């Protein structure tokens, strides 16, 4: 490759490609330089099948935001064929391997971060904690490409096992709480969840949430309690007033 003026950046690993001659294993290298036509030259010199891939093998119109990317497989006898190995979905920022390739992962960009597919449970928790718009993106991908291609079996099994449990993940940085309940996932603002705990009589949980928060969040939650107290008192909602007084006492806040 160096004799052909290619700079080898790294070895990616082994993949298998389904050709007209059956499945063929290739070792993949990331290179820098002009690669169009290189596969035929190397196949002839080395006496083994070689493939090349790059912008010149985009199959379709990239501006349409949905296209395939192929590889050109060259054989030592001079034959060659172009095989699509990836589908790129610009609407969902998704890169899905076709049935013609093994040994590569599907990927999806969600909220600016690249995730390998299928998503693990921790990936789902992270995504769901970052907002409803990202959740909708996952749901759309699952409806288009199939649930088990987007979400791992292990994650799905964890969701099924948790039907009677409520799992709570708090993300103080984004200000959202992730709830996994009955096999369903939802996100709600931290402030709303905090108030729901208080009005629901779960003052110890509310206290734990408050005490685990960073200082800036504690200030916001304290102001929220005071605002809710003033509203409840002006409306004569005595049950709410008493709940808010109780949590204020537990947290050492003045109303």
Image (cartoon, helix red, strand yellow):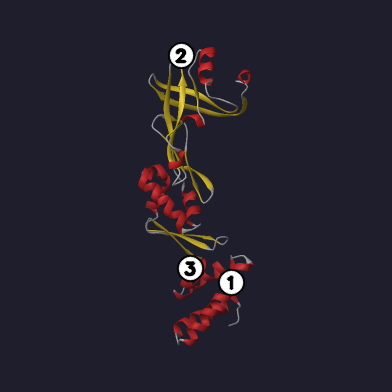
Residue nearest the viewer, comparing 129 with 141 = 141
Mark 3 or 2, nearer chain start: 2
Q: How crowded is mark 3: few (under 14 residues within 10 Å), some or many (20 or more)?
A: some
Image position of 82 with respect to 220: above or below: above
Q: How crowded is mark 1: few (under 14 residues within 10 Å), some or many (20 or more)?
A: few
Identify the residue under disc 1: 220
Q: Residue at x 46, y 16 (%)?
A: 75
- For residue 243, side relative to residue 163 (left or right): right
Image position of 79 with respect to 87: above or below: above
The secondary structure type at the circle numbered 1 is helix
Spot occupied by residue 158 in the image (x, y as percentages of width and height): 41, 50
The quadrant in which the C terminus is found is bottom right
Q: Residue at x 54, y 77 (%)?
A: 225
Mark 3 or 1, nearer chain start: 3
Identify the residue under disc 2: 78
Residue nearest the viewer, comparing 189 with 241 = 189
Identify the residue under disc 3: 193
Q: Distance between the residues labelled 3 and 2?
A: 66 Å
Q: How far apart are marks 3 and 1 (CA)?
A: 13 Å
Front disc: 1 or 2: 2
Q: Which picture quadrant has residue 167?
A: bottom left
Q: Residues within 10 Å of mark 2 (few under 14, many from 20)?
A: few
Front disc: 3 or 1: 1
């Amino acid at each position: 490759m160096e004799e052909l003026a290619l700079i080898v950046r790294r070895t990616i690993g082994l993949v298998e490609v389904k050709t007209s001659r059956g499945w063929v294993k290739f070792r993949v290298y990331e290179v820098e330089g002009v690669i169009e036509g290189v596969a035929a030259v190397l196949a002839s010199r080395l006496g083994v099948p070689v493939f090349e891939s790059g912008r010149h093998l985009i199959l379709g119109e990239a501006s349409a935001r949905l296209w395939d990317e192929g590889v050109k497989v060259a054989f030592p006898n001079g034959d060659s064929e172009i095989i699509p190995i990836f589908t790129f979905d610009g609407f969902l920022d998704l890169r899905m391997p076709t049935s013609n390739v093994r040994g590569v992962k599907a990927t999806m960009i969600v909220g600016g971060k690249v995730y390998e597919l299928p998503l693990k449970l921790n990936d789902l928790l992270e995504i769901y904690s970052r907002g409803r718009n990202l959740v909708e993106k996952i749901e759309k991908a699952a409806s288009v490409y199939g649930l088990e291609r987007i979400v791992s079996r292990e994650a799905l099994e964890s969701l099924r096992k948790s039907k009677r449990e409520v799992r709570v993940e708090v993300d103080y940085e984004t200000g959202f709480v992730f709830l996994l309940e009955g096999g369903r996932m939802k996100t709600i603002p931290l402030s709303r969840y905090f108030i729901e705990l208080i009005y629901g009589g779960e003052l110890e949980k509310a206290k734990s949430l408050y005490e685990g928060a960073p200082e800036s969040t504690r200030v916001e939650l304290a102001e929220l309690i005071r605002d809710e107290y003033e509203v409840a008192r002006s409306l004569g909602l005595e049950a709410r007033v008493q709940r808010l007084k109780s949590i204020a006492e537990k947290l050492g806040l003045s109303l």
